[in-house]
Image: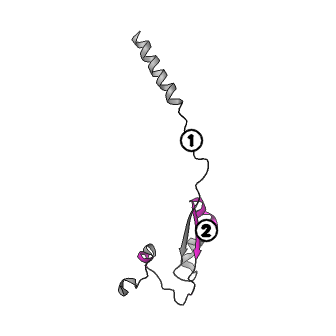
Amino acid sequence: MTRLVAVALVLAALVLAACGERTEPTGAPAPQRLTVLLDWLPNADHAPIYAAQASGAFRRAGLDVRIQTPSDASTATPRSPVTMETGDSPCSSAAA
């Protein structure tokens, strides 16, 4: 008799656990907008960036990438990877 009660309790627990409603996302999230500021006019070093944009790799990764060249190439300064991450100009710490 106790075995029958235990089986009934397990079955009741399984039925109640299956009754919960779970909402699933119904679409892809909006792509994250990202602007890539090139350190110079477009050149061969930037080819992977342009290739990824042309092939749709950025879009598949959930990114809306906009590539921006410097407005005046004569005043553009090459940036190191550190300044590319922080957005600081290479000379900003010397001026402070």
What stretch of residues is rendered in magenta? Answer: 54-83
52 or 19: nearer the eye? 19
Rendered view: 32 above or below 84 = above
Q: Which quadrant of the structure image shows residue 64?
A: bottom right
Identify the image quadrant of residue 34.
Answer: bottom right
Quadrant occupied by the C terminus:
bottom left
Q: Residue at x 56, y 79 (%)?
A: 44
Local packing at callout 2 (Cα closer than 10 Å; few below 14, some 14-19, many 20+) is: some
Report the mark closest to the observer, 2 or 1. Answer: 1
Residue 87 is drawn in which quadrant?
A: bottom left
- Quick check: is 3 in the magenta stretch? no
Residue 6, image x, y percentages:
42, 17
Residue visible at 51% across and 86% down in the picture: 76
The structure residue drawn at horizontal position 60% and vertical position 62%, both measured from the top left corner, is: 59
Task: Tell me which amino acid carries mark 1.
Answer: Thr
- Amino acid type of the residue tagged 2 in the rendering: Gln
Please tell me whether residue 44 is drawn above or below residue 52 in the rendered image.
below
Q: Which disc, if any, is residue 53?
A: 2
Can you give x and y, in whole percent of width and height, for residue 45 in the image? 53, 78
Where is residue 9 shown, x and y percent of the image? 44, 19
